[in-house]
Image (cartoon, rainbow, N blue to C red):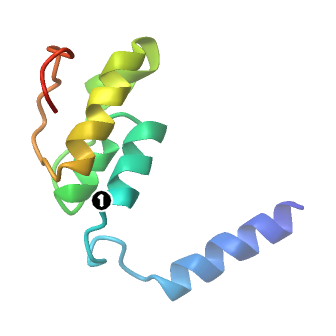
Amino acid sequence: MKKLVYLAVLCSMLTFPSFASAAKDAGAATVLSMVFSGSGEWYNRDFKGNFPWGECILGEICCLVKVSSAFDAAAGKTDNDIRLDFWSKP
């Protein structure tokens, strides 16, 4: 099973050599933010800058941070700030 996973990863790396040059996709940014908070905005920034570790950790603790990160990523935002006013419009 391990060999199949390694083969799938290798094939995807060869098929898509540069993920940063891919076209921006709101769905992909939203899924990335739902998996790791802040990674969708990082994707929208073409993976430039540091990974948003603070937002990622807070997103695992508080589900509202994860949801607001997904809304921000779907809207195409690229900021590094953690949005704590969850009741406002995304």
**Residue 73 in the image, given as x and y percentages of width and height:** 25, 46
The quadrant in which the N terminus is found is bottom right
Residue that appears at 42% across and 83% down:
17
- Residue sitting farthest toward the bottom: 15
**Residue 42 in the image, given as x and y percentages of width and height:** 24, 49
Helix, strand or loop under label 1: helix
According to the image, label 1 marks what residue? Answer: 26
Q: Is residue 21 above or below residue 84?
A: below
**Residue 19 in the image, given as x and y percentages of width and height:** 36, 72
Quarter of the figure with residue 28: bottom left
**Residue 53 in the image, given as x and y percentages of width and height:** 31, 30
Relative horizontal placement of residue 48, taking residue 14 as reference (left or right): left
Quarter of the figure with residue 65: top left
Relative horizontal placement of residue 46, taking residue 58 as reference (left or right): left
Q: Label 1: few (<14), some or many (≥20) within 10 Å?
A: some
Quarter of the figure with residue 2: bottom right
Residue that appears at 16% across and 57% down:
45
Residue that appears at 39% across and 12% down:
62
Relative horizontal placement of residue 45, taking residue 3 as reference (left or right): left
The quadrant in which the C terminus is found is top left
Residue that appears at 14% across and 14% down:
85
Q: Is residue 58 above or below residue 44?
A: above
Q: Amino acid at mark 1?
A: Ala
